[in-house]
């Protein structure tokens, strides 16, 4: 029998490296970050970061590379390193996405076919007390204020990254909401949204309901537990969930 190209220890190391791309539980006196991450195939294409631009501004990003397995994980690693290198020199989510799109197209899409990345980026400005976001083919983020019972959907208004040398459309679209103490931001990948249940996909309404009823900082684990309890069969896609709770 031929020796496998990748040993079990190789795959375990690759899975550990990919898991390190997901932002850990963290924060400071202004906000808290909690996460849940579960790759469907041991390694996959989800990536997140929460990284300071400067003392008053923080970027929160999530992306999902098309496909699963080692190739997707390798590309997620390149997305991670590029985003981290670009954040210190960009001013808003559109600048960040434009730079990432050009990088993906130059390095990968121009040589390969059917490669694309969904991306969602939020700039938290503590000085101006604002959240500015832009989404690129990614499921909507959710914003929940302290007295609200239904979260607001922050929808993607731009198409996927990596499908052309420039962002598609005349202009990149961003929107802004006021940052309030006690506000909560939820980012997730489509593995959660499309998780199969006996009655169909897990879906937006279930995500919104569990998020709104969860305690601050507990939404990622509550959503993952709810999806696991209802799932019909094994997970078919990576599931990544990130919550930012602002103080």
Image (spheres, rainbow, N blue to C red):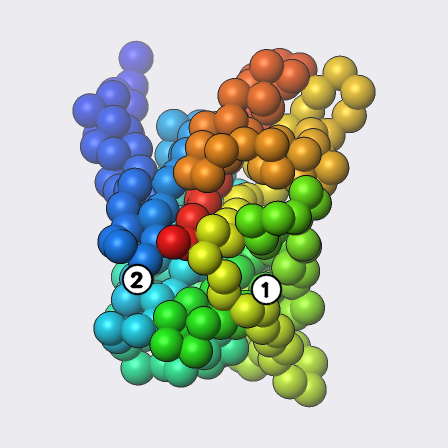
Q: Which residue is situated farthest in the front direction here?
A: 147
Q: Nearer the viewer, residue 131 or 173?
A: 131
Measured along the vertical axis of the image, is residue 152 above or below residue 173?
above
Q: Where residue 223 appears, x then y in whole percent?
A: 55, 29
User: Which quadrant of the structure image shows residue 45?
Assistant: top left
Q: Foreground residue, 121 or 114?
A: 121
Quarter of the picture containing the N terminus is top left
Foreground of the two, 217 or 137: 217
**Does residue 230 sit above or below 203 in this rendering?**
above
Residue ID at (61%, 38%) = 212
**Label 1 secondary element:** strand
Q: Pointer 2: residues within 10 angstroms few (<14), some, or many (20+)?
A: some
Left or right of 71: which side holds 195? Answer: right
- Badge 2 element: strand
User: In the image, which disc is placed on residue 51?
Assistant: 2
Task: Read off the residue under disc 1.
Answer: 135
Between disc 1 and disc 2, whose residue precedes?
Answer: 2
User: Residue visible at 69% across and 81% down?
Assistant: 169
At 40% across and 72% down in the image, what residue appears? 125
Q: Looking at the image, do the residues carrying marks 1 and 2 touch, with CB atoms under 8 Å apart?
A: no
């Amino acid at each position: 029998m031929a020796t496998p190209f990748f040993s079990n220890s190789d795959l375990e190391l690759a899975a550990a490296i990919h898991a390190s791309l997901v932002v850990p539980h963290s924060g400071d006196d202004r906000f808290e970050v909690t996460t849940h991450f579960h790759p469907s195939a041991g390694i996959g294409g989800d990536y997140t970061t929460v990284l300071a631009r400067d003392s008053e501004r923080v970027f929160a990003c999530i992306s999902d590379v098309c496909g699963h397995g080692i190739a997707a994980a390798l590309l997620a690693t390149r997305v991670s390193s590029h985003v981290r290198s670009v954040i210190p020199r960009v001013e808003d989510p559109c600048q960040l996405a434009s730079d990432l799109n050009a990088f993906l197209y130059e390095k990968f899409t121009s040589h390969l076919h059917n490669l694309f990345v969904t991306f969602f980026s939020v700039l938290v400005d503590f000085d101006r007390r604002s959240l500015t976001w832009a989404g690129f083919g990614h499921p909507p983020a959710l914003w929940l204020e302290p007295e609200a019972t239904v979260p607001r959907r922050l929808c993607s208004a731009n198409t996927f990254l990596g499908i052309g040398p420039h962002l598609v459309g005349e202009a990149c679209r961003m929107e802004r909401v006021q940052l309030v103490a006690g506000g909560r931001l939820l980012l997730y990948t489509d593995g959660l949204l499309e998780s199969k249940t006996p009655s169909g996909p897990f879906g937006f309404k279930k995500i919104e309901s569990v998020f709104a009823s969860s305690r601050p900082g507990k939404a990622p684990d509550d959503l993952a537990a709810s999806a696991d309890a209802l799932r019909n069969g094994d997970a078919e896609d990576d599931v990544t969930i990130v919550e930012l709770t602002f103080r």
